[in-house]
Image (cartoon, helix red, strand yellow):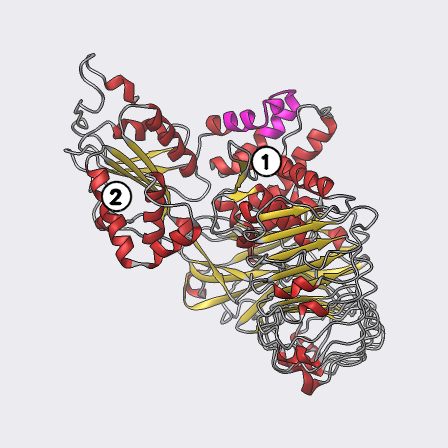
Amino acid sequence: GDFNSQKTSDSTTEKDFVLFAPKGDPINVESSSSTAPIKVLEWLNYADVGIIEIQGDLGMGSTWTTKCVMDSALKSDLFDEVIWVDVATKHCNRSNMMMQIADHLNFISTNKKKRKQVQKSEKLLKLLKQKIFWFLSDKRFLLILHDMRMFFSSDLAKLGVPHPDIQNKSKVLFTGREYLLYNEPAHRVLSLVRLTFDQAWSLFSERTETFYVSPADIRSLAETLVKSCDRGPLEIILLAGALRHPKKSKKDIALVIEQLRQVIDLRKTLPFKNVCYDMLPSLKLKDCFLYCTHYVEYDHVSVKGLITSWMLEGFLNGFDSLKEAYDEGERILGVLEYRYLLSRSKDRKYVMIDESLRDRYHYILNKGSDEIFTKPELFINDRYITFVDESLTYSENRVAITTLLLYGNADSSPCNIPWNFFYKMWSLEAVIILHAGIKALPRSFADLGELRVLVLRGCLSLVDLDNIKSVQRLEVLCISASPTLNKIPSFFDMHNLKTLNLSYTNIEELHYSLSGLWRLEFLILRGCSKLRKLPRLNKLGSLIVLDLANCISFTGIEDECFGYKPDLHTLDLSRTQVAELPFLLQCINLHRLLLTDCLHLKTLPNLESHIFLSVRDISGSSALCTDSNEVYSGHCVDHNDQVKDYQPLPSTSRLSQRGQSSAPVGLKSYMIKARDLEIQGADNSDWWKWKTRSYEFEEVAELLEAENLVVQGRMDTRKLSPKTKYGAYIVYQLTSNATGFNVTVDPRVELTIKLKKKTVSTTHVHLDPKSKLNPPPRQRGGGWMEIEMGSFFNSQGEDGDVLAILKEVTHNHEKSGLVIQGIEIRPKKSR
């Protein structure tokens, strides 16, 4: 398989030698990533193999395999050009793919404006395609099209790429997750499969630097972990990273064993990506990593741009200087790199994150709204990012600067910015001023016609913002932790504003022009202790988050001033003086309602129709009386204090008719979402399909086809209310064409509750609502049903994890059409 082995004599080069595939050489081959490169390298030597496909699910090692092939090809004499094109990051856009080929061949300028001109001009693209074709026609090339979605081999001509054949001896290598990428078969197809245990153990030992090979008790636990994995290379590497110890650290055997057991327990119920996220040792690390997953369209991100983003978002607070904050950003990058969650380029200027890790659905979001202030693409190009310290000096060309970050010193200097500081900064799109002692922005700030983002945080002397009134393209205005600021100018010219954050300022009211900001999505006024009321919000139909927590003087919003809010995701009125909230009925897609310590709140409307409501926290709202049709529980948390799906509890009357009880006021309830359940075969797209039920992050699992059914949910009893009896309920639907669940095939399932690894209760039921062999499922609204899985008593939370398990009893028949939303654990009313 080695290129160099094909030389026949001193006078015959690799490019002159013609080698054909042996007779009977298989077209389709299965291989793990550890041996796949050898097979692909062998195929590259065959003249009659022009198109090669590598297919495999995310995490199976297709990127690693392909890079190994590319590195070997570059070291050989077999090809004149080896070209790598990332397809998925450009959404299979043909012009973007052509631009990547042109970049490799140095056919196009790096100037941003000139590149845009080429991409927008059909004439220039046609000329570029012709130039690529004539150049490659005389070359023997290897074109790698990485991570295809849908592509036909005939489309090569649209990129200006000659079709590979025996005469030109060129090759095209596709990688992707689809089985049919084009309308004619590839000459060779390699399907990536799981590693063997020996291969997985070798990879795990290598990535943990062999520490887990001995002593025997540690090795036994480590082998247990590897055996429990699906043995995809990415999973093995990331779990190894979660357990990796710094070389200079003292290895405490007891701590290592404890961490191994923790990962093994987490892996039983969580996808490996969640495990690696949960094993990060601090919230700061989790926030910074989670932010990286916003770069869904970029395979390379500048280090400077990423750390700038972290500063802007407030992840790197509490430092006395810009250097200290930046150094902390570098330290965090080092930790994430050490754990294999990201990698750095050879020059250390760029960060890469594996595409499969950019799937945000796999992570628990600390912020229920998933709020970030700016789009990451603002900071992709670090050539136009300028850092300024308290000296206010910089060396860059002011005309070219697009992002400026000014970081004050420990003594809050600078106290003043010269009036002409922003003069001629016509390209400036983002200004970030942190911990400076300024009282106002200079006059030249008003001339920043391209400004989209303004962040002022921790400016303790700030009093005047008049110079922002004329900045018309502003999309993000974030002014927080400035206690001397008591007045905000009008918003008449800020028609593009999407985020307004004035947290922990001393404002008493907002200008009535706020009512016209119809694009506004985030209105965050947390901790504005003197704010009493808001202007009319009825035209703000795009609001996603409204946060008024700790606005202790705020008395409420009149119903007619609020208006219809179809996109409102989070409403936080904790520790305000609101007395009633009739407008909640206009927030039909509300996910999070936070009303902690609302001492004046006496009533809430019936929210049973709010089927997406994820959490309702009314703890401490002692005056609250529910109406005759609605019962409210406390807040919903999961085993990591993260928000989970929680359906509104049905009316008292319905529960009493069913002979069931509802959750008492102030007690914690819990919903384990489908994504966080352990579902047998959930990663197999032939068995299960993941479906989004709303515009945000709510996903459910639909059974496509399977014979065995096992679903398990787990949670830590310490997170539940003590001295409380709880019930567990499976929440599901059956589609109209569901099969295998009707009573004629006896599709019984076993529902089990386990505590301290001991069975507390077991029952057998039919999921078919038409079955007369058990009480019918209780209807929850929105087409969802629930069946009680069993109950248990939570004393003081000392019993560890409680397990709720659904397992099929009868086998040998196919099933489909079961849709699972989650398992709810809620208090049962004492009799």
- The magenta stretch is 201-222
Alpha carbon of mark 2 to alpha carbon of mark 1: how far?
37 Å
Query: In terms of secondary structure, where does tag 2 sit?
Result: helix
Q: Nearer the viewer, residue 15 or 494?
A: 494
* Residue found farthest to the left: 167
Q: Which residue is mark 1?
A: 337
Secondary structure mostly taken by the magenta-highlighted segment of the chain: helix
Mark 1: which amino acid? Answer: Glu
Q: From what the image shows, is residue 530 above or below residue 716?
A: below
Q: Nearer the viewer, residue 582 or 629?
A: 582
Residue pictured at 49% horizontal, 72% vertical: 770
Q: Is residue 331 left or right of residue 297?
A: right
First in residue order: circle 2 vs circle 1: 2
Say which mark, if any, is on residue 449: none
Q: Is residue 316 left or right of residue 204?
A: right
Could you say where residue 695 lies in the image, as x and y percent from the top left?
Answer: 52, 67
Mark 2: which amino acid? Answer: Ile
Q: Nearer the viewer, residue 246 or 234?
A: 246
Q: Residues within 10 Å of mark 1 (few under 14, many from 20)?
A: some
Residue 202 counted in the magenta span? yes
Quadrant hosting residue 418: bottom right
Q: Which residue is mark 2?
A: 132
* Residue found farthest to the top: 10
Q: From what the image shows, is residue 274 above or below residue 703?
A: above
